[in-house]
Amino acid sequence: MQTKQDYYQILGIAPSASMEDIHEAYRKLAFQFHPDRNQMIPIANQKMLEINDAYSTLSDSIRRSAYDIPMGYHNAEPKFKRGSRVRVSAHASPFNDHIGVVDQEPIQGSFRFWYIVKILVNGLPSIPRLAEEQLKKVDQMIPAANQKMPEINETYSTLSGPIERRSNDIPVEDHAPEPKFKRGNKVRVSSHASPFYDHIWVVDQEPFQEKLRFWYIVKLTSNGLESNARFAEEQLG
């Protein structure tokens, strides 16, 4: 028999709701019933207390499992089976975000199912014991994504670094043969490593090309004194 408030009903979601559904329902209700927005409505404060109580329980996977069983909402069947591919979603675990395979049939504990998962780390197998709420189903498209991700990371690391990008551009003929700035242009130093970072300068000479980039001699007048410095094109904005 149900003896507690129905937290799912309070948040307006189904017992099968995902964690994302719970967060979204709470966000909407908190905005609607927050006492600061409803100072003239006494019931709003009580309603907000109920919403917070429901959310604090359902947003915690262990407390949610303990709540679901006496309420009759607990899933009597394990979410994964032996041979299922799963991803670890426990931030406190050293295996977080690793993909593994359920190595044995799940074991039902007091409030949850437990799984023995085989995970390869640096080519060596590890077999941790993980609770059901610490695992997520691996999409069938994940293997292709995992194969694509190193290419994406390598591309980003090259194109997000101005020097690495220029080294890539020249061999593939994508490098602009013309300098970005001309003599007399006002420029701002965008190199955090420079003591002149964020200073505004004037290009004092025509730029010249050397190896993989254009170089500029820029002049700064500060406190009546003139200073010249040499900067690469990617250090200026």
Image (cartoon, rainbow, N blue to C red):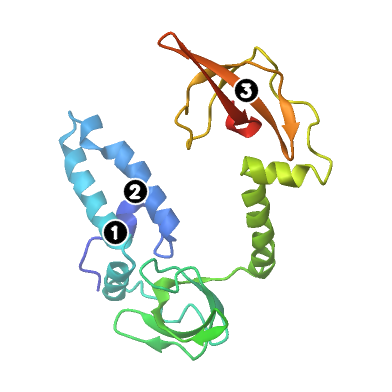
Residue at numbered disc 2: 26
- Classify residue 123 as left or right of residue 97: right
Residue 166 percent location from the top left of the image: 71, 41
Mark 2: which secondary structure?
Answer: helix
Residue sitting nearer the eye, 208 or 106: 208
Is 191 placed above or below 150 here?
above
Instruction: Please tell me in which quadrant of the rendered image residue 229 appears.
Output: top right
When the figure is inspected, residue 199 is found, relative to residue 210, above or below; the finding is above
Is 174 placed above or below 121 here?
Answer: above
Which label sits in the foreground, 3 or 1? 3
Q: Where is residue 82 in the image (x, y as percent from the top left)?
A: 54, 87
Horizontal side of 110 relative to 166 (left or right) equals left
Q: How far apart are marks 1 and 2 (CA)?
A: 11 Å
Circles 3 and 1 in contact, beta carbons < 8 Å: no
Percent x, y for residue 192? Answer: 48, 35
**In terms of sequence position, does the residue under pointer 3 or pointer 1 come before the other?**
1
Question: Looking at the image, do the residues carrying marks 2 and 3 touch, with CB atoms under 8 Å apart?
Answer: no
Kind of residue at disc 3: Ile
Mark 1–mark 2 CB contact (< 8 Å): no
Front residue of 214 and 140: 214
Q: Is residue 184 left or right of residue 15?
A: right
Would you name the residue on which mark 3 appears?
A: 217
Which quadrant is the N terminus positioned in? bottom left
What is the crowding at mark 1: few (fewer than 14 residues within 10 Å), some, or many (at least 20)? many
Q: Which mark is first along the chain, 3 or 2?
A: 2
Query: Outermost residue, left direction?
Result: 42
Residue visible at 56% across and 17% down in the picture: 219
Task: Determine which residue is flagged by label 1.
Answer: 7
Indicate the position of residue 188 as horizontal and vertical percent values: 54, 22
Residue 99 is left or right of residue 17, and the answer is right
